[in-house]
Amino acid sequence: MTDETVKTDYEAFKREVWSQKLNAGLDKNCVMLQCVNRDYQGDADKGTSQINIITPLEVTTGKYTGSIDSYGAAQSDKRTLKLDQSVYFGFSVPDINQAQTNINILDTIVDKAKTAVETAIDTYLFNEFENVAAANVLGSESELVALDTATIYSKFVSLAKILKSSGAITSEKQGWVVIHPDVEELLLLCDEFTGVANLGNTTVSNGSIGKIAGLEVFVSNNVGKNSNGYTILAGTKAAITYASHIKKIETIRAQSSFSSIVRGLYTFGALTLNPSALAVIKASIA
């Protein structure tokens, strides 16, 4: 098999094709990607690994009485979004399998790669809970909030209230909450969640099981549980910005077999821009 034949056979594994297929799968199924904004993805698509973000700190307002006395000093906050997280994937396809359609092979492999990348993204983004505003935390590692079927609904309502009081949730900015399957089980046994009130909510996002007080509920087995208890994370898309880039896709010939190796590097990063748009419950299940 000539080098030219190998190049033609693996035309389906170009970076552009991988980017479209992998990102489409992640956007559809990765839980935490439903909960962040991608406002700076365009910069990441250009290949940059560091994005400078400038946001205004304060806007001067006042009662207008015919003249404006002060505009205040122009202040801004400069933050840097770094794509400093990396996940690699790789696989070998024997030449004997070249008779198969590469697109079919690609779809199968993309699905397997997506699962690994999805776990890394979910874990990484969920850990942004560490940047939550201190006033937006219910419970602590030493004093966990005990949840049972009688209390879980009211605690979620309190979580939503925190985000509404901070101005994070408005008529235009909807909220979300991410929970572990253990917490989901408790929630599904709660009559207030499974009753008529919840049936009126329309579930439009992948992975959502319903709503509580305006919070769309997502479930992931990748996050939210440790040896001490459970972390329940809520917020709006304004809280965290995320960007990603498939840095490299390359095909090389294997040295010890009649195979070709395809490998890639997926880079990503996130930044909490608004800690007040996040809220957390440190909980235990009674």
Image: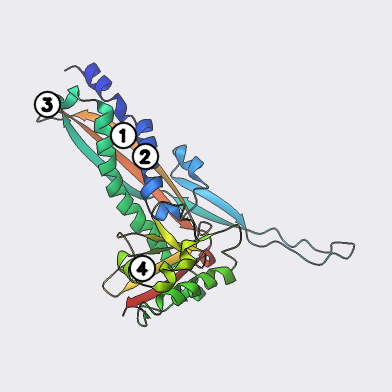
Q: Amino acid at mark 2?
A: Ile
Separation (CA) of disc 3 from disc 2 = 27 Å
Check disc 1 and report the residue beneath it: 249
Q: Is residue 134 visible to the viewer in this orientation of the structure? A: no
Q: Measured along the vertical axis of the image, is residue 164 above or below residue 146?
A: above
Find numbered disc 2 in the image and state the secondary structure of the residue it sits on.
strand
- Label 2 belongs to which residue? 246
The colour scheme of the drawn protein is: rainbow
Which of the 4 image quadrants contains residue 187? bottom left
Residue at the extreme right of the image, as rendered:
66
CB contact under 8 Å: marks 4 and 2: no
Helix, strand or loop at mark 4: helix
- Name the residue located 84 percent from the left edge and 62 percent from the top edge: 68
Q: Are marks 2 and 1 in contact (CB under 8 Å)?
A: yes
Q: Earlier in the sequence, mark 3 or mark 2?
A: 2
Q: Nearer the viewer, residue 243 or 221?
A: 221
Q: Report crowding for label 4: few under 14, some 14 to 19, many 20 or more residues within 10 A (C-alpha).
A: some
Identify the element where label 3 is drawn: loop
Taking the image as shown, residue 130 lies to the left or right of residue 262, namely right
Find disc 4 in the rendering and name its residue: 188
Give the foreground label among 3 and 4: 4
Q: For residue 130, what is the image quadrant?
A: bottom left
Q: Residue furthest bottom?
A: 143
